[in-house]
Image (tube, rainbow, N blue to C red):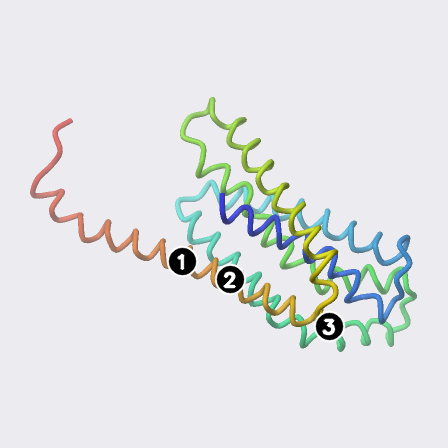
Amino acid sequence: MLVACVAGWMIMELEILGARVLAPYFGSAIYVVMGSVIGVFLLSMSGGYMLGGLLSAGCHSELALGFCLTGAGAWLCAMPLIIRPVCEGIWDAGFDDKWGSLIATLALFAVPTMLLGTVSPTAVRWLTRQASQSGRSAGLVLAVSTVASFAGCVVTAFCLVLLSVRRTIAVSGVVLLAVGGAVLIHVWLSARRRRSAGPSEELNPRSP
């Protein structure tokens, strides 16, 4: 649930900061830049939900989620370095503000948003122990992550936009790296415990 909250917060934070990132290059018209940002985020989240559903069905879903979170974190850490060359390159290629903002949003934000979108399906799978619990688990994950998105929206709109946008994105990347690293460490420790418990279980088998 904590990982779902972090992902929900980060998605909404990036969506609001995305408009600020693109405004110096493509303007701040709501029907152009904001339309591109909202559309790309919705499309990327859809792809992330599908990818997360596929990954959650595997036996290494925790490992996959850890790599998705660290991948999103690494992307955000690198984003401050690539914003200017990407946006200027798209503008210099001759695209207008509409298509330019759409392509720039895809190039900068599609990948991390899709990776963050894999969290919700995986969290639903982890919380579900029986088929009858699937609806309750899905509702709980969606409700909690949406509340976290609301908090991320308010804090970003009221506070974080007043700070350095690029620095905020980089710090968010570090947070995601830490969360993804914690998941990977948990996977490694769990696998180590299983390996160490193997011989004792063989010597003292449990009765059926």
**Residue at mark 2:** 70
- Identified by mark 1, the residue type is Leu
Residue closest to the eye, 150 or 111 = 150
Q: Relative to 110, is 164 above or below?
A: below
> Pointers 2 and 1 in contact (CB under 8 A)?
yes
- Identified by mark 2, the residue type is Thr
- The quarter of the picture where the C terminus appears is top left
Q: Residues within 10 Å of mark 3 (few under 14, many from 20)?
A: some
- Residue 94 % position (x, y): 91, 72
**Residue at mark 1:** 184
Residue closest to the eye, 173 or 100 = 173
Report helix, strand or loop for mark 1: helix
Report helix, strand or loop for mark 2: helix
Q: Is residue 156 left or right of residue 144?
A: right
Residue 174 falls in image quadrant: bottom right
**Residue at mark 3:** 83
Between the residue at mark 1 and the residue at mark 3, the CA separation in whole angstroms equals 29 Å
Who's the residue at 74% across and 56% down the image? 157
- The residue furthest left is 203
Q: Residues within 10 Å of mark 1 (few under 14, many from 20)?
A: many
Between the residue at mark 2 and the residue at mark 3, the CA separation in whole angstroms equals 20 Å
Which callout, 1 or 3, points at the residue further toward the start of the chain? 3
Report helix, strand or loop for mark 3: helix
- Identified by mark 3, the residue type is Ile
Q: Is residue 30 left or right of residue 107?
A: right
Who's the residue at 70% across and 71% down the image? 164
- Residue 140 % position (x, y): 54, 33
Q: Residues within 10 Å of mark 2 (few under 14, many from 20)?
A: many
Who's the residue at 24% across and 49% down the image? 194
Q: Relative to 19, is 129 above or below?
A: above
